[in-house]
Image: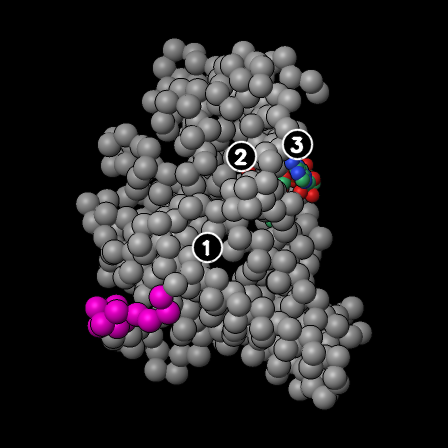
Amino acid sequence: MDIRWSAEAEAYRAKVREFLDANLPGDWQGLGALTTEEADEFVAKWRVTLSQNDLLAVSWPKEYGGGGLSPMEQVVVAEEFARVGVPTGGPNDIFSIAMIGNTLLNWGTEEQKQHFLPRILSGEDTWCQGYSEPNAGSDLGNLGCKAVADGDEWVITGQKIWTSYGHMADWIFVLARTDADAPKHKGITFLLVPMKQPGVEVRPIKMLSGESEFNEVFFDEARCPIGNVVGEVNGGWAVAMTLLGHERGASAAVLPLQFKIEIDRLLALAKETGKAADPLVRQKIAWCYSKVEIMRYLGLRTLTAWLNGGSTGAEASIAKLYWIEYHRVVTELGVDLLGMDAMVPSGRMPLSAFNPDELGAPNSSMSWTISFLCARAGTIYAGTSQIQRNIIGEMVLGLPKEPKSDAGPWSQRSQ
Ligand SMILES: Cc1cc2nc3c(=O)[nH]c(=O)nc-3n(C[C@H](O)[C@H](O)[C@H](O)COP(=O)(O)OP(=O)(O)OC[C@H]3O[C@@H](n4cnc5c(N)ncnc54)[C@H](O)[C@@H]3O)c2cc1C
């Protein structure tokens, strides 16, 4: 593990700082210091500024409108942005740039890249992810939403669930069953489907927090052009598994910084609530602090592997399991400190509920309470904690693989 940055990286860091100084207001205190409305307005304008300065989609090649930055430069940008509390993109970019954009770069045809990538960067198209189904979450390969070729179109029928931002998106990338007689991972195709059409119905799901960010999506003979396949027909499983690979290094660097900011807020909360001298509270805060320090070193190990091209792929599971299980505990401590105030939360909603709230965010009881609820969801989305443990057990510890009882055709599986 290397914990120092090269002179080249430090020189690039100085350039990023110049950009930030030139483009942020003089009294900037972090996105969290803005009201929700101000923050929305700022992020929309900031995304345009990033695009104009080649700092949106920093890992994409320049020929597709990206930043064309090296892995080291990408990490420096992410770190410097986190340090001053500005986002690296807009709210849909996790789906549009990080997921489908990166996937198209790996697997898309030239025509698909030329058509879709500029529309993602301009914000013209927003995306959502159509993977999970009522009977296919952790066991995603069991999915049953089917697509049948009909002349120059695919006809899609079935249901997706937990589709985040599905109510706002223009497009959905869908995993669909195109050969029911093949083994379950071999008859799946990755399709690009427009949301705004008669065959697509979106039904919002109300969350524990009272918000409604995700949806059920029903396809009733919905259609997309026959050429909207990414990768091979029936080869969608390999495509589906490549999502999110590009940003692994940046998140390894940024997460510990964001969690450190949250610890500072936790300390302030302990003082505000008069509990900073309580020995049990002090012990728990010290535990949180040491977990974040370990997260920093884990991140550096991931970064070193990533920058040297030696990533195993299992680091993503280690990192996700570590930070999400930590976030459950630290937000619980926040709620404990609030005591009865957590029962009637007030103040501003967190700008970023699934991650630590933004730099500059007030210590509102609403922010801690919603973050506490959303931290539970974190142990489920993008692979549950149990599934991450399975991956780590098999890929890192070399434990025996889970028994597989579903090698035959998907259509003959036991229900
Ligand atoms: C906030 C949020 C946003 C989401 N957004 C999206 C989205 O935009 N698009 C999308 O497609 N999906 C999305 N999801 C769905 C998410 O990917 C699934 O919820 C997740 O994969 C788990 O699937 P499941 O809910 O069907 O649970 P199940 O797979 O039914 O699991 C139930 C329980 O059994 C455990 N379990 C299952 N299999 C095993 C095993 N082999 N070994 C040990 N334990 C096991 C699980 O860990 C879990 O505790 C989202 C989920 C959340 C919470």
For label 1, the crowd category at 10 Å Cα-Cα, with few meaning under 14, some 14 to 19 and many 20 or more, is: some
- Place of residue 321 in the rendered image (x, y in percent of width and height, measured from the top left): 58, 53
Q: Is mark 1 within 8 Å of ligand 1?
A: no
Viewer-side residue, 395 vs 58: 395
Name the residue beneath numbered marker 3.
134
Name the residue beneath numbered marker 2.
131
Q: Nearer the viewer, mark 2 or mark 1?
A: 2
Disc 2 to disc 3, how far (Cα)? 10 Å
Which is more N-terminal, label 1 or label 2? 1
Residue 410 is inside the magenta segment: no
Q: Quadrant of ligand 1?
A: top right
Say which amino acid is labelled 1. Answer: Pro
SS at mark 1 in the image: loop
Viewer-side residue, 249 vs 348: 249
Name the residue beneath numbered marker 1.
91
Magenta part of the chain: 2-13
For label 3, the crowd category at 10 Å Cα-Cα, with few meaning under 14, some 14 to 19 and many 20 or more, is: few
Q: Do we see residue 259 in this rendering?
A: no
Say which amino acid is labelled 2. Answer: Tyr
Is 222 situated left or right of 212 in this image?
Answer: left
* Quadrant housing the C terminus: top right
Q: Is mark 3 within 8 Å of ligand 1?
A: yes
Viewer-side residue, 3 vs 410: 3
Question: In the current view of this chain or complex, which residue is farthest to the left?
Answer: 63
